[in-house]
Amino acid sequence: MAISKTNVPHRIYLTEDQMPTQWYNLRADMKEKPDPMINPGTGGPAVPEDLYPVFCTKLAQQELDDNTRFYDIPDEVLDIYKIYRPSPLCRAYSLEKALGTPAKIYYKFEGNNTSGSHKLNSAVAQAYYAKDQGLAGLTTETGAGQWGTAMAEACSYFGLDLNVYMVKVSYNQKPFRKTIMETFGAKVFASPSDTTNSGRASLAEDPDNGGSLGIAISEAVEVAVTTEGYRYVLGSVLNQVLLHQSIIGLESAKAFELIDTYPDIVIGCAGGGSNLGGLIAPFMRDKITGKANPRIIAVEPASCPSFTRGKYAYDFCDTAKTTPLAKMYTLGSGFKPSANHAGGLRYHGMSPILSKLYHDGYMEAKSVEQTAVFDAAVLFAKHETILPAPESSHAIRTAIDEALICKETGEEKTILFGLTGTGYFDMTAYAQYIDGSMTDHIPTDAELQPGFDSLPQLG
């Protein structure tokens, strides 16, 4: 039953039987597909068998599938989803009033689980496929900690071991993230660590190395491929992850149908692309097929500007250069973000799917500085009662900016953004913002150049 457009509740919930039972593969509807992964050993396009030593078999098959439009969500995954999904689509009435804007601001809230983020959507799926394959355990990396926490939850549920390599600067800034992962039985290592060859190499080069997702990925992959019964899992960037996260956008689209509304602008924060790709999936489909024409905006940190200042090129997904090469917007696998970067959006590259869509002009991208991001986070918290994660707050910043433009023009646009999670483990960053010690860092061209110099030269 549709809800009156003049009486939209603060929170719009789908019923359990309205929750999607399939994931949507956006690649099936793309007019031009993302460029294929390259096997660094052969120099040719990767095939699923190339990925089997690293990923679960069915996940490797999903990774390279450009044609299957919908995948059935396994019943075991749906059973867990139903504990915390469907998630609400919320109308930000109080924020609208504070801004004095005619815009209608909606956000999809993904923080209703212990990880405090959207990451559980893919963690549950990846852990399920590992269990179904009969594996003993998994390895992964995490930046700010949401993915590691989600993976720890999922592995605990399915009875799998988990080793997490956490970017050292975040490991030190957010000790309680480590604690919650350990609560669910995971082993957590500060990366770069002295437990792997790639970690020891990074420390030998720079003993004070604060880490990066590229380094953490190298460590996790190394352990996965050298440990019997283990595989590696990743929380963003990969095609399989965007597939699982499509449930966010599919639920959003269904909720908008219930209120007979459609967003004019869709905004998501962008680090590797998991939440952005999931949120925009059905709306991008409409844009590609000509059904609608929403503006779609990716928002990234100015300190790690993969979209806005990166190069569209083939690059390794990890610092040790052991993974297949992906065509993406990248700062180079050797790029290390500034240590003062407060959020988890610190990966050197961007999802190949999103990179292709951006390259072909289907979406926009902008970068924002973190003090402006926290300005928006605090304003949102005061008016909407949720303390947002720093990552999500990049999207909040841009949603506020777009709403203020509507205030100037008088346009009554409908804005949707993804509130990917809560910020209750990010209090060090909030404290720095409040006491005035938070600073911004925008890398110079000279600082970015070493990363670009590390890009592989393909014949």
Image (spheres, grey):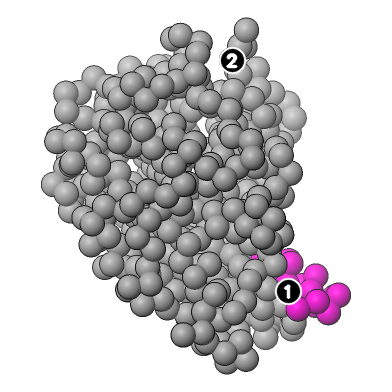
Amino acid marked by disc 2: Pro
Q: Are marks 1 and 2 in contact (CB under 8 Å)?
A: no
- Dot 2 corresponds to which residue? 456
With 351 as the anchor, is 292 left or right in this view? right
Q: Decide: is 243 above or below 228.
A: below
Residue at 32 percent across and 65 percent down: it is 113
193 left or right, relative to 68? left
Q: Quadrant of the C terminus?
A: top right
Q: Residues within 10 Å of mark 1 (few under 14, many from 20)?
A: some
- Could you tell me which secondary element the residue under label 1 belongs to? loop
Res 432 → quadrant: bottom right
Q: Cα distance, mark 1 to mark 2?
A: 44 Å
Task: Tell me what residue is drawn at x 58 percent, y 33 percent.
Answer: 34
Q: Check disc 1 and give the amino acid type.
A: Lys
The prevailing secondary structure element of the residues shown in magenta is: helix
| SS type, badge 2 | loop
Q: Position of residue 226 (x, y in %)?
A: 24, 19
Closer-to-camera residue (94/180): 94
Residue 402 image-quadrant placement: bottom right
State which region is magenta: 398-413
Percent from the top left, x then y, of residue 259?
56, 81
Where's residue 94, x and y in %? 60, 84
Q: Residue 78 — which label?
A: none
Count residues near mark 2 (Cα–Cα under 10 Å), then give few for <14, some for 14-19, many for 20+. some
Q: Which mark is residue 413?
A: 1
Depth order, front residue of 15/377: 15
The image quadrant that residue 101 belongs to is bottom right
Relative to 97, 116 lies left or right? left
Q: Residue furthest right?
A: 409
